[in-house]
Image (cartoon, rainbow, N blue to C red):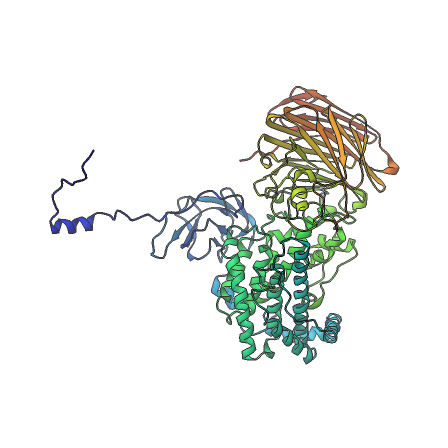
Amino acid sequence: MRSTRSNRRPLCLPALILSLVSVPPVFAQPLRLEERPAEPETWGYRPDNGAVSQTDPPSFCWRPQPGLTWEIECARDAEFANLVYRAADITFNVHCPPRTFGPGHYTWHYRGKDRDGRSTDWSRPRTFTMADRAVPMPMPGRQELLARIPRMHPRLFLRPENLDRLRDLARGELRDKYLALVKECDRILTNPPSTQEPPKYPPGTDTKSEEWRVIWWGNREYTIKVLHSAATLAFTRLLGGREKYGQEAKRILLACAKWDPKGSTGYRYNDEAGMPYNYLFSRTYTFVHDLLTDEEKDLCRQVMKIRGDEMYNHLCPRHLWQPYASHSNRAWHKLGEIGIAFLGEIEGAEDWVWFAMNVFFNVYPVWSDEDGGWHEGSAYWDSYLSRFTWWADIMREAMGIDAYQKPFFSKVGYYAMYLMPPGKNDGGFGDLAAGRTARSNVPLMSILAAQAQNSHWQWYVEQLGGPIPTGGYIGFVRGQLPRVQAKAPDDLPASRLFAGTGQAYLNSHLTDATKSVQVVLKSSPFGTQSHGYESNNSFLLWAYGQRLLIYSGYRDIYGSAHHTNWMWTTRSTNCITVNGEYQKKHTVQAQGRLTAFLTTPDLDVVVGDASQSYRPPVEQFKRAILFVKPDLVIIYDRLKATEPSTYEYWLHAVNQFEIEPVKHVRVRNGDVACEVSFAWPRDLTFDQTNEYDPNPRPRIKLREWHLTAKTTGKAEQAEFVTVFQPYKVKDRVSSSLVVMPIPGGYVFRGQWDKGRITALLPTSDGALLEAEGLSTRGALKLRLERPGRSAQIVAVQEHQEP
């Protein structure tokens, strides 16, 4: 055993002093930069290596670390000798520079600094490209941005210096809208809303129970009724309405100011009531500000200080790195409204505005990329963007920021056009979307067409009966927007890929859904999180005005047993389970992507890869859809597992399936039907039911039909070739469909009265196939022949992960 006694001689005092001076402190720790890869649920490092920025400058984002401020450098070279931008003392982990960079290649890095002035090492460099036609969208600095907001009231939707112009419009060009406001105000005076504080949940109330649901949503509607009335009265009085309107608005405002800010309408207690309370209270306050005494203003400020801090502390800084909480994506701009209304009057209001603007410039929208789709589906696209348009109006007036410059907003209306062409009565994938129609989109599309001045979107609106103007005081403000000339989408392809959300909309016609067939495939990089929970590689089929193959279930309440254990699972979609097990449910970890897309006037092809969506033993699930417009939809599925497994092919319909011999199924809805031929594999067993597992709550009477085609044996690999022929019942179809195995895969031959198609379907990415005068290695190869026309031959190769 080694002795612990020291054998060294004691140091004399001078030597001891020298030692203390010259030897580095033993316990000093270097300041470490946390730079591990971004998790799927985070916003991630942006712009990442290889990214192409469509906005100039780009929005920078990096992993946050507590206790640090940040420095960023951007250069035209990897050695940072040719710096084009540098910023220091950045508070957030995001940053949008206040000036443009210009086209070209750039490299950026960042580092942190603590309160003692110590810096981390620089991060690893990341190189990106500024697109040649990137949209100039610099973010003003904090002081400049806040200085743009008027110090006088009103501040939301209008500026004090614009009041006289708006009053002139109320007497002239917008008189009809003004008189509608007056009529509504008189109605409110005749029957004023109750201002009694709504109730909290009784002790012992089960969250998500029916009793809970009634109070939860009821308090939202009650709060909106009360404070929307106050905001309407106050705004109309500003335009020259009766003084009584302002006095009644003030009475309602001050009565609501007495509600417990952390009670039944508190943001964290019930955000569905808390959010509308906060923004409607703020609007009323700024509209009626000149009628309030100093004491009354202080009361309002005290209330909104508590409510604003509650929102801010919940959202900031979390939302700048983990922005995928659904409700937070409408909460941040409500916080921005509070901040503008109370700027300079509440401590912290400046921070609320600055945070909201950093979200807009750096972390919005989260459910899409610049292609304009929406992961959560058409119902939430409508709901959330409709609310965002209020913030767009406010930003433009208060700060001179045009939201519609963002590339996303130059494309966002095409999502509705392609998913729901005129005449469509289904909203596609996404929570609450099934009951929507194309007409449901008109209010929002009317706004988007006017705000973005997009002629295609205006055409869409006019095809559906014309614009539906926004009502109330917001509609009055928007009445100033210029008219838009409609233009039919004759210059656009009928089908479109929305890669960012992993959805492809294949249409035979874009202008009239009642004369069209549509196929939708989903395989999303967002996974199955939030309200876009349908499984990857699931599809929908819609034809000639009718829903044929659907996703199933009905949300009785978010998070109920039916919602989570049926609708969130693969069993509820037109997809495939393995050994009865479904994809990872309701999670960003269930990753999918669309790996190939081709559209022509006669033929569309799209390929989805959902291999990462399953747990073991599933290793691969790729689905290819070949759409011969409008007659045939050929779906080719490839699955691999690490152990012998069974495979279950699910289909869902409004009405009962007709199951016939030789693996043939028919589905019918009204005057439209679809023949379904399970061409491969040869041995399948069929079953169907109109029960869910579990069923929704008793108040929901809906029942749909669910068909399962199951392999009879177990195998480590399986391929399905399934052919769908939609048609109007009066035009019953006949066809010859044959699938044959060949070395490397399969050859499919289809013949019907309008043509003939031959397809080579490889079983692996490198497989060599030769048949019918065609050859391919790993790619789908198709030959389409129609009478009197030249044959069309296409090859479709998947894009591999970098």
Which residue: 77% across, 42% down? 704
Whether residue 422 sits left or right of residue 331 in the image: it is right
Q: List x then y, in percent, for residue 73.
A: 42, 51
Whether residue 72 sits left or right of residue 727 in the image: it is left
- Residue ranking furthest to the top: 743
Relative height, residue 749 to residue 3 (above, below): above
In this view, the residue in front, 191 or 624, is 191
- Where the N terminus falls, by quadrant? top left
Q: Kindly tell me whether residue 29 is visible in this rendering.
A: yes
Relative height, residue 138 to residue 257 (above, below): above
Q: List x then y, in percent, for residue 502.
A: 63, 42
Which residue: 51% across, 72% down? 345
- Residue ranking furthest to the front: 204
- Residue ranking furthest to the right: 730
Q: How many circles with numbers are drawn on the protein?
A: 0
Q: Which of the 4 image quarters holds residue 222?
A: bottom right
Q: List x then y, in percent, for residue 744.
A: 64, 21
Q: Which of the 4 image quarters holds residue 77?
A: top left
Q: List x then y, in percent, for residue 452.
A: 66, 57
In this view, the residue in front, 158 or 180, is 180
In this view, the residue in front, 310 or 766, is 310
